[in-house]
Structures are given as C-alpha cells and as structure tokens.
C-alpha cells in the first residue's frame, strides 16, 4: 500500500523468511542448552560399622552425597530411602532423616509404628527390625504396616516398600497426638533442595523393653536435575525478541 500507511506482516516475502530463520535458530539454541533432560539418579550407601540406637537419646549417622560425574545434580526431584535395622521392638523404633545444612529440613521415616492405634498398635512390639525401602509411591503407610499384607524375614524384620511415616510428633507424645498428626511426604519435605552435602540419619529407641535396635545399613537413592543456567535465560530472551519481530508492523515503501 502507498501513502506510508502501516501494514502488518502476514508472513510473506523476505522479511517473513528472515523472521522464520531467526525463530528456528533460537529454538535450536534453546534445545541445545536446556539441561533438564540430563538429570541423574544416584545411590549413596552408608559403609560404616553397625550403629546401636540410643535409648531415648538421638544418635546420628552421616552420609556424604556428591554430584555424579554425568548429569546435573542441583535440584532434588525424587528420593527413596533404604533401611536395614535389626533387633529391638518396632513399636519403640524412631528414625528421622535430615538434609544437608545446619537447619536442613527433616522427616520422620519411622516414628514408633502402631503408636497412633490404641487398640491394635501394640502388635508391632513382637516385630524386631526392618529391611525396607521408603518411597512416596508405595501403597501403604509404614506406621500402620500391621494392618496390611506384609512379609517378615526369618529374624521377624519387616520387609518391602512402604510410605514413610511422616508424622512430625515427639516420640513421647500420647497416642491421640499421633492419630491426629498430618503426614508429610519425602518429596514434600526435600523437593528442589540441593542434595549435595552431608545427610544425617537420626535413630532412637524409645524403650529398653525388647532389646535395642542396631542400624546395619542405610542408603539414599536420589534423583536430581540441574538448575536453569544463564544460557537458558538468554535463549528465552532470544525467543521473546524473535516473537516481537514477527509481531512488529512495518512501514511499506511508497
């Protein structure tokens, strides 16, 4: 059109080809630098000697987590915990996991199973340990494992994969506080933290009755991804700029 009036660019001509090429270049740039597909899953295992639980006193066991050689490992997106505990009675067993940092977040993995049930919870007193994996996607709560089909090994230790207890209740609290407590999930507590550093497993036996538990092994299976990089942000700005070019109107020559 003539008269210097504005006309929109509907995608035809050299300008449209140039803009299309710009968009393709930006899209390729983003695809090459977005790192989230290169996350990593790694398992870290405690290889120290067995640890005897403290009687109404916390004992902490450290586990060092480092970034694997391949894949980004900055933001935690998944977590599973493996425990092997022998002896004691399960009703009085307490295990808590804490993330790195002086005040790192924590969760009760096991918190006196059966304590929330004043009628049948005492059944767990006859069980003597755990060989379990704790994961959010398990089907049943380990605190109430006695209500579900379960397998015990020859040492009367609970086996299988269970949801973590997640009840943030002082182990000395009465049963009704356990019953009323809201549960937390592993990913709810730890998601998006940086997993690199020293994790701690805190263990305690609430009563001397039935013997004292011993921690034999424990391990963390961590899934983590990289943080968004500066290059990704630059690429996003590139896309925005390209879109603005496509939307911009131009003045046609007379």
Image (spheres, rainbow, N blue to C red):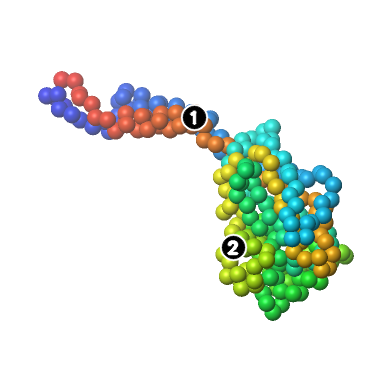
Image quadrant holding the N terminus, namely top left
Quadrant of residue 44 within the rendered picture: top right
Residue 72: tell me if it is visible: yes
- Residue 183: image x %, image y %? 59, 62
- Residue 194: image x %, image y %? 60, 41
Residue linked to disc 1: 230
Vertical comparison of 136 with 40: above or below: below
Residue 30: tell me if it is visible: no
Residue extending farthest to the bottom is 119
Vertical comparison of 160 with 146: above or below: above
The kind of secondary structure element at disc 2 is loop
Residue extending farthest to the left is 3
Residue linked to disc 2: 183
Tell whether 91 sits left or right of 254: right
Q: Residue at x 58, y 66 (%)?
A: 181
Tell whether 164 sits left or right of 204: left
């Amino acid at each position: 059109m003539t008269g210097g009036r504005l006309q929109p660019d509907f995608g035809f001509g050299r300008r449209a080809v140039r803009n299309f090429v710009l968009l393709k270049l930006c899209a390729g740039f983003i695809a090459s630098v977005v790192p989230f597909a290169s996350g990593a899953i790694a398992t870290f295992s405690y290889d120290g000697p067995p640890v005897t639980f403290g009687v109404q006193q916390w004992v902490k066991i450290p586990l060092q987590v480092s970034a694997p050689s391949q894949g980004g490992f900055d933001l935690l997106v998944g977590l599973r915990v493996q425990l092997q505990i022998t002896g004691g009675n399960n009703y009085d067993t307490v295990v808590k996991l804490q993330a790195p940092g002086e005040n790192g977040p924590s969760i009760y993995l096991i918190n006196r199973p059966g304590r929330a049930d004043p009628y049948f919870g005492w059944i767990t007193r006859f069980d003597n340990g755990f060989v379990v994996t704790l994961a959010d996607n398990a089907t049943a709560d380990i605190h109430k494992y006695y209500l579900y089909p379960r397998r015990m090994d020859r040492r009367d230790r609970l086996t299988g994969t269970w949801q973590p207890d997640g009840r943030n209740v002082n182990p000395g609290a009465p049963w009704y506080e356990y019953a009323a407590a809201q549960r937390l999930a592993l990913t709810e507590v730890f998601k998006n933290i940086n997993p690199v550093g020293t994790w701690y497993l805190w263990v305690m036996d609430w009563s001397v009755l039935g013997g004292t538990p011993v921690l034999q092994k424990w391990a963390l299976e961590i899934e983590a991804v990289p943080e968004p990089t500066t290059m990704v942000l630059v690429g996003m700005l590139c896309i925005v700029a390209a879109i603005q070019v496509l939307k911009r109107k131009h003045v046609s020559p007379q």
